[in-house]
Image: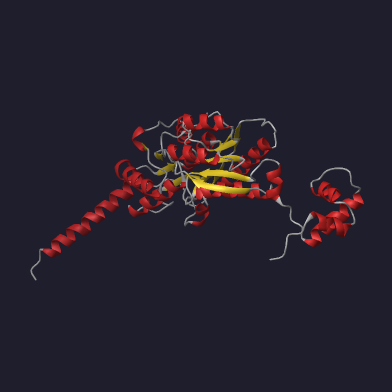
Amino acid sequence: MPDRVTIAQVAEEAGVSAMTVSNVLNGKPGASDETRRRVLDVAQRLGYQPNISARNLKAGRSGLIGVLTLDLTTQYGLEIVRGIADELAAAERELLINATYQDGVREMERIEFLSRGLVDGVLMVAPVLDEETVELLRRKNIPCVVIDPRRQDVALPRVIVDNYEGMRRGVQHLLSLGHTRIGYIRGESDMDSSSIRFRGFCDALTLAGVEVDPRLVVDCDFTYAHGFQAASALIGEHRPTAIAAGADLIAFGAVDAARALGLSVPDEFSVLGFDDLPQASQSFPGLTTVRQPLHDMGQTAARALLSILDGQRLLLDRMQLPTELIVRGTTAAPADVDAILDRLLASSRGTSDDAVGASGQDA
């Protein structure tokens, strides 16, 4: 492996002092335009790379940014982390990633660990943020920005999205198609984002003159399996013509639950999600959903943290990004779900009766 090109080598080749090279590469004034061009051309030709570790060490920094994410498997968290990584790479920063699995105790342990001078600041994706953890961050004086926290009023710089308007517009889309019997699967009720989306759902119905039916509202975890179970129960017991889900994973479960019950999506049943995960556009049919700008959320949080580390004061501690309704293939005008399910049940009973009759014949 070739030795790293040094500032001294660039200075010798360009015919200037090492101090001049350092000033040019760090964007400091003092060199003429001709000298600046010559230094940059030589640095590029020789393949000079700044020794970031040494620079950070001199500045009393590690050069690392700690990232605490809910896990390393779901596309939700990975898309946000990808946005963080892209922004920090441009700033020549490295990531130290830990998964917390939305465990408040683990969050606190990770913060305690990272506070030992390992990182210059911390970014937290969908954190629990118990009061003890917030106090620990203050006591250790760790610069921190959080993304989509469980409690949105937490006293830390935070990046969130417009959950209310996103869900309201999504439900308005279902109403505009003619749906009035709309089921709602909220997600985890102790998360502020779930409560805010539910408020958007209720207000959309109320403004349209449609009464909110509590029998059509259920809570579940943000998972495919729980979405499948919740949707199966809603469709089987209360027969809505559409379901609005608090997350894409829940919506994917709802789509498959409708299909398992014999309903065609969207011809006989509609489903709305919330997130716009990559698989939302890759599934068949594509999922109609409310887009959270996950990549932008990561970039915005990383940019805010870098500003704090540079000694700048944030204009806003609460950074809210817009959402967007993405209409794809899981929503259409309502069908007569009662008639369809009655027909399917009758057909199922007829098949069962025929089987019983056949079994009773003489061999």
For this rendering, which residue is in front, 172 or 146?
Answer: 146
Question: Does the image show residue 203?
Answer: no
Q: Residue at coordinates 67% horizontally, 30% vertically from top-left?
A: 315
Say whether residue 262 is left or right of residue 145.
left
Q: Residue at coordinates 74% horizontally, 56% vertically from top-left?
A: 49
Residue 303 location, quadrant: top right
Classify the position of the C terminus by image quarter.
Answer: bottom left
Q: Residue furthest bottom?
A: 363
Q: Residue at coordinates 33% horizontally, 35% vertically from top-left?
A: 215
Question: Does the image show residue 107?
Answer: yes
- Looking at the picture, the colour scheme in use is secondary structure
* Place of residue 163 in the rendered image (x, y in percent of width and height, measured from the top left): 52, 36
Say whether residue 95 is left or right of residue 235.
right
For this rendering, which residue is in front, 12 or 269?
Answer: 12
Callout count: 0
For this rendering, which residue is in front, 286 or 31?
Answer: 31
For this rendering, which residue is in front, 49 or 197?
Answer: 49
Query: Please, is residue 245 above or below residue 47 in the view?
Result: above
Q: Residue at coordinates 25% horizontally, 56% vertically from top-left?
A: 347
* Place of residue 181 in the rendered image (x, y in percent of width and height, measured from the top left): 39, 39
Classify the position of the N terminus by image quarter.
Answer: bottom right
* Place of residue 213 in the rendered image (x, y in percent of width and height, measured from the top left): 37, 33
* Place of residue 221 in the rendered image (x, y in percent of width and height, measured from the top left): 39, 42
